Image (tube, rainbow, N blue to C red):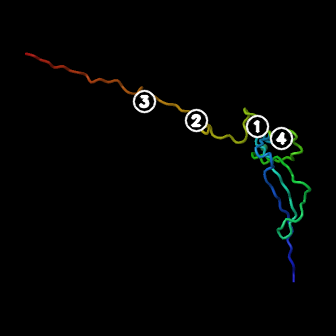
Amino acid sequence: MAICITFGTHEFSGMLEGYENVRAYCYNCQHWNGHCVTRWPFFTVCFVPLIPLAMHKYKEVVCYTCRFSQDLRDRPDITPDTRAPPNMQWGPQPPPQAYGGWQQQQDPSKQQPLQQPPQQESMNYK
Ligand SMILES: [Zn+2]
């Protein structure tokens, strides 16, 4: 009788608490599209996570544009209040129509031709 035990690893990941709204600068692609995530790898036996492979959760900054990731300890510039500057553009740009677009109105009355039918008076008294 054989007992089959499957070993493996499983990784728990999610948004880093308190950093959900952070937009950090990505040094790789120069976009303000870095998001803070946590990772915690576990050693699994029969697909059951038993032993954490790390003492702490990894805290990382992952760029949504280029998938570049950095340990948060290497980014002391990032705080829970880190945001992109308002004049900075981050990530793939939405089409310009998304901002409400332009509204060019044409005046239809300008195109109306001024025409008056010629009036012929035929008053012939004889
Ligand atoms: Zn990037």
Residue occupied by mark 1: 84
Residue occupied by mark 2: 101
Image coordinates for residue 93, horizontal then vertical, percent: 68, 40
Image coordinates for residue 33, horizontal then vertical, percent: 76, 42
Image coordinates for residue 118, horizontal then vertical, percent: 25, 22
Numbered disc in front, either 4 or 2: 4
Q: In the figure, is residue 119 to the left or right of 4?
A: left
Residue occupied by mark 3: 108
The first of marks 3 and 1 along the sequence is 1
Q: CA distance from mark 2 to mark 1?
A: 23 Å
The first of marks 1 and 4 along the sequence is 4
Mark 1 CB in 8 Å range of ligand 1? no
Q: Residue at x 78, y 48 (%)?
A: 67
Residue type at tag 3:
Pro
Q: Secondary structure at mark 1?
A: loop
Q: In the figure, is residue 72 to the left or right of 23?
A: right
Q: In the figure, is residue 124 to the left or right of 84?
A: left
Q: Quadrant of residue 32?
A: top right
The first of marks 3 and 2 along the sequence is 2
Q: Residue at x 87, y 52 (%)?
A: 58
The first of marks 2 and 1 along the sequence is 1
The first of marks 4 and 3 along the sequence is 4
Q: CA distance from mark 4 to mark 2?
A: 34 Å
